[in-house]
Amino acid sequence: MNQKKQTKPRKPQPKASKSKPRTINQVRVVRQPRAQAYTKADVERVCGLNDPFCPAARGAKYNDMSNSRTLSYQTHFRQTLVVNGTGSAATLFLPNYSYLPQAAASTTGTVSGFAAPLLVNPNIISAPAAYRITSYGVILRTTLPKLTAQGMVRIRTFSPKNGAALGTIDFATYNCDSYMDVPLANLTELSVRATRLDNTATFMRDPLETTPSTTPTAWVAPGWTCFVVGVDGAPASAVALDMEIFINYEINLADDNVMAQMATSAPVDQPYITSAINEVSSEGINIVVGGAKEFAKNVVSSAARALVRAGTTYFGGGLAAGASMLLT
């Protein structure tokens, strides 16, 4: 009769010490730090300072070590681009506080001249003590029927410290940071944003450093790049483009302005958030065909990747996508 072989009961294994790595079959097992989940709020903070069309951009603020109280607000308005008798026109977008984008004083073919004084922007809170831009961009839409929308839309972005070289711009050249040429008949929506020129974009600026009634050549860059939108070959004297402009600011207000009571402190500094914001900004996605929604997809995707990489640096285990990561 077969009998089962009697075996000695195994001795209970001592619990692994939390302070020391345990071994299995002489192989050292090292506990890996768990990945922390980034949240929808993290993505919104990154997108809010990189996507001027995102709802999170309204109210977005930089992290400040000074904890200075600022008022965050968005100026949102529209302009049209009307071509001349030869079907050409251009508008120069110069990030600043006091002035509107500048229509070209003259355009011949692909060459546009910007010599007229800048016009004061009526869509702003007047007389702040200081300001800085958190994001800046424009959505372009054509107003022409497809059957008659001949011609080209041309975008050029630049990164000068001032406007000395912006008096004349020739769209036939590509001496710029980034560019795009799109047939007017194919244009539905196109998004363009300015990007940070350097770390001075986070500095508070004098709103009158670009002085009243100045011309574009006297413009002083507030730490941001500029860009120009041009059209050539369009039907004569037509309204070729509708331009929806978004500029998001933080401002300091003087002590005699009652709106200073509405100012709030900067958000708490989180290094991994700051790192992700800088990474997305440096990727240089400035021009996107498809409008604000397509632009948002690019920025959210970049923000997610940047948060994972930043989490690896600051948390060891990285950041995993949280359940509430997706923006709606």
Image (tube, rainbow, N blue to C red):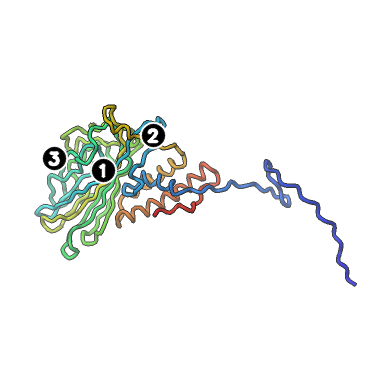
Kind of residue sitting beneath label 1: Thr
**Tag of residue 116:** 3
N-term-proximal mark, 1 vs 2: 1
x and y, in percent, of residue 121 in the image:
20, 40
Residue 248 figure quarter: top left
- Image quadrant occupied by the C terminus: bottom left
Residue linked to disc 1 = 75
Residue linked to disc 2 = 265
Residue drawn at x 26%, y 43% is 75
Kind of residue sitting beneath label 3: Ala
x and y, in percent, of residue 35 in the image:
54, 48
Q: Residue furthest top?
A: 255
Residue drawn at x 13%, y 59% is 235
Residue drawn at x 16%, y 47% is 112
Q: Residue furthest left?
A: 85
> Helix or strand or loop: what does disc 2 sit on?
loop
Kind of residue sitting beneath label 2: Ser
Q: Residues within 10 Å of mark 1 (few under 14, many from 20)?
A: some
x and y, in percent, of residue 52 in the image:
32, 47
- From mark 3 to mark 2, how far is it between C-alphas? 39 Å
4 relative to 80 in the view: left or right: right
